[in-house]
Every structure is written in C-alpha cells, then in structure tokens.
Amino acid sequence: MAKVGVFVGSVYGGAEDVAQEVVGQLIAKGHAAQLFLDPQFEDFLEYQNDVALVITSTTGQGEIPDNLLPLYLALNEQFPLLSGLAYGVISMGDSSYGEERYCGAGRQFDELLAQLQAKSVNERLDIDACVNFDALEVAIPWLTQFVQRITE
C-alpha cells in the first residue's frame, strides 16, 4: 500500500474537514496516510518517493492560505526535483471571484509540482463553493479514482 502525505491549506476549516475525511478513507483502504495541518518543507520531502496530496482552499485574490504558503515558498525557492513523487491536488474556491482567482491556490501548487517533475496521479480537482455546498460530494469520487491509481 502507498505512503500518502496530505498537506492542507485552510482558513475557515473547509479544506481541513475534507482532508480529515480523505485521510480516514485512505487509512480504511490500507494506506499509510498522515495529515499535515501546518506543513513544513521537511515534512513534504519525506514523501518525495511516495505520494503527496495537497488539499487547499483559496483566499482573497486567488492566494494560498497562510498555513500552506511557507511550504509553497520553500519548494519554489529551493526547487528540489521530485521525479519520484506522485501527487494530487484538491483545490477549493468560489467561482464568483472570477476565473483568474478561482481555485488559484490549488492551481499554483499543481503548476509548481509539475515544474518540480513530480507526476500527477489525477487531474486537479477544482471544487466550486457556488455549485457544491458539500465539497465531499465531489471529493470522494475523485479520491476513489486517485486511490485506484496509486494502488496500481
């Protein structure tokens, strides 16, 4: 089974709630999953030959939440090549803020991880708060596919 680090960016707790459910489901399926609510660069590097799942809300003008921003900046500045990393991104946002800002935090993480040569397991999941009041309704089907792919 896979070793999965779940790295969370949350302001009001929505992304954290999704992440806790995701970790529970990963563990129930036999994977070694760990939740990081205050993710550090060193924590992320522990998964460079395993699986990382970034679950983040988007703030303000499409920005990364404060608790996840230091990890993003460290990855961007130190630029470690992560060719052994498989990853996924669940991005939460509100499309009423405009297309440029919608799910901006997840989009930025997805682009950075691709630049670091990590391998995307699934296409990024963008969850629109205007459409999906319960983020888990769309996150769980996406997770099912993600789990199938990391198990193969």
Image: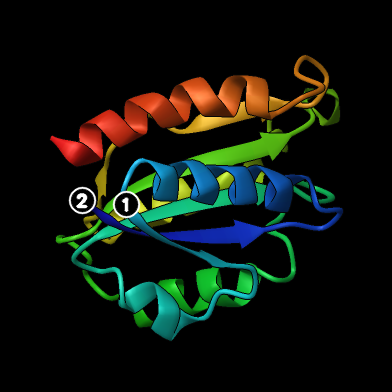
Say which residue appears at 73% left-offset and 61% top-offset: 65
Residue 19's x, y, as percent? Answer: 60, 49
**Alpha carbon of mark 1 to alpha carbon of mark 2: how far?**
5 Å
Residue 48's x, y, as percent? Answer: 25, 69
Task: Using a 10 Å C-alpha cutoff, classify the residue at mark 1 as few (fewer than 14 neighbours), some (14 to 19) or many (20 or more).
Answer: some
Which residue type does callout 2 highlight? Answer: Met
Say which of 20 and 62 sits in front. Answer: 20
Q: Which mark is residue 31?
A: 1
Task: Using a 10 Å C-alpha cutoff, classify the residue at mark 2 as few (fewer than 14 neighbours), some (14 to 19) or many (20 or more).
Answer: few
The vertical placement of 64 against 79, above or below, is above
Q: Which mark is residue 53?
A: none
Scheme by which the image is coloured = rainbow
Q: Taking the image as drawn, is residue 122 in sight?
A: no
Residue 115's x, y, as percent? Answer: 30, 55
Residue wearing tag 2: 1
Say which residue appears at 79% left-offset and 26% top-offset: 129
Say which of 97 and 4 sits in front. Answer: 4
Q: Is residue 24 left or right of residue 5?
A: right
- Counting labels gives 2
Residue 151's x, y, as percent? Answer: 19, 39
The local secondary structure at tag 1 comes to loop
Q: Quadrant of residue 152?
A: top left
Asked whether the beta carbons under mark 1 and mark 2 sit within 8 Å of each other, the answer is yes
Between discs 1 and 2, the one toward the N terminus: 2
Which residue type does callout 1 highlight? Answer: His
The local secondary structure at tag 2 comes to loop
Q: Quadrant of residue 145?
A: top left
Q: Taking the image as drawn, is residue 64 in sight?
A: yes
Say which residue appears at 51% left-offset and 30% top-offset: 125
Q: Quadrant of residue 106?
A: top right
The vertical placement of 31 against 101, above or below, is below
